[in-house]
Image (spheres, rainbow, N blue to C red):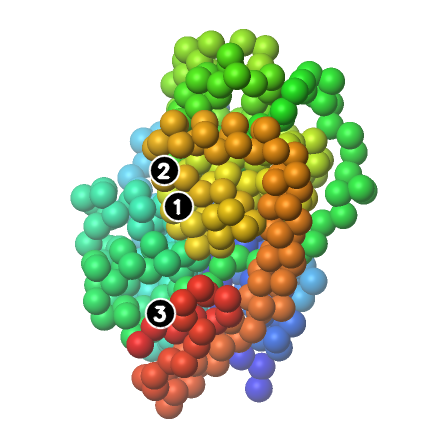
Amino acid sequence: MTLKVCLTTLEYPPDVGGVGESVQRIAKMLSALGYEVHVAVFHSKLRKVGGVVQPSVGSNTEQYSGIWVHRIMPPVRSSAPIVQDFLSDIYAQMKRLHNQYQFDLFHSFFISETGFLTTLLAKEQGVPVISSIRGSDLHKHIFGAKLHSQLIWTLENSDWTTYVSQDLQTRAQVLTPAVTHRSSVFWNSIVPIDFTELPTPALTEQLRGVVIGSVGRFRDKKGIEYLLEACRSLQDKLEFTLLFVGDYALREKDYWLQQMEASGLGDRLVVTGLVDHDTALSYLPHLDIFAIPSLHDGCPNAMLEAMLAQRAIIGTTVDAIGDILDHGIDGLLVPPMDAERLAEAILQLAQSPELRQILGQAAYQKVTQQLAPAVEQRNWQQVYERVLNPSILDQPCNGVVPSIRDFECVS
């Protein structure tokens, strides 16, 4: 009998976002393992365009490469809708999907909103549930008083929780010690990329000197202030270009524009604005140094892509950045919020092309071996088999612990 699993997420391609990309990758892995995979997608933002309420109701179901994708669209009944009404409607439609397909397992990604709703439904229906913590849900949303109790309840009542970094699991264990025996940590994986097949990016003629770059959607957690300050302090010591590939989070745009202006970097600073994924990737081979000075960041795909591009990486000692990179071997690590140490690391790499090459090659070897899709697929296979088989769910874990090189169980 083919088991049916339902993944729940706030985004899924073609939606833009790292969580959506991860869910799609994992859905394909589970389908290859023989599961019938359904993905229920609902957005946390209420659907309004130009201030006009969007009347769509129900769900739009399509099948892509054997994966069922259900885009849930609850009604938005007023110009000032109430979030709990919105989520209550999503819950009702999720229950209708379950009644139709009779899922054998639920699996939520990002426990804010998605995790609580999914775990509540699973427990009421007597179905096992996995909650996957991705980053901001425990690093930032835990400080919201309205969400705190829901997050704790979800951690306590999930049959299994997974984390993309040791920092996230540690926080969960502090908040809810019960997860210690029902959790695992393993990294995202990434499919190899042929950078020679990508187009030449448009702004390469503006890049001069040593090119220091960062890629992504720039917002609070990315630590960009400290990269700007580090580069400002190097203006008299180094010829360089600071390249930001991406755009600012809309709600923070005014702040970041002020920070860019105040940096005094002038034409040393180049910002591409919003670009598609292939264009973002095409800039990586033109970087000498990839900087990811995050304050917290789950397991960022942008860093894995930089590793595939054999870039010399400077990261902070947070989340999977600090878990994956070995300082001085396949990257350089600095403390978060430390512009001085960041500047020292940039200067060290800028003055040593040989070190940049050594670190880049070592990063490539690590990402292609230890973060290969086959490794992540094996990890998910173990988690699913454990949760779907009650006779082994409470048995001790015997995974590989210290460096999360494979499936990690904590017991």
Pointer 3 or 2: first along the chain = 3
Pointer 1 or 2: first along the chain = 1
Q: Is residue 282 left or right of residue 304?
A: right
Q: Position of residue 42 (x, y in %)?
A: 46, 50
Residue under the point 49% across and 59% down: 187
Q: Position of residue 38 (x, y in %)?
A: 54, 65
Seen from the viewer's position, the closer of residues 244 and 162 is 244
Q: CA distance from mark 1 to mark 2?
A: 7 Å
CB atoms of marks 1 and 2 within 8 Å: yes
Question: Image quarter for residue 376?
Answer: bottom right
Q: Position of residue 162 (x, y in %)?
A: 40, 64
Instruction: Find numbered disc 2 in the image and state the secondary structure of the residue it sits on.
Output: loop
Count of numbered tags: 3
For mark 3, does the 10 Å Cα neighbourhood hold few (<14), some (14 to 19), or many (20 or more) residues?
many
Q: CA distance from mark 1 to mark 3?
A: 22 Å
Question: Image quarter for residue 390?
Answer: bottom left
* Residue corresponding to mark 3: 183
* Residue corresponding to mark 2: 336
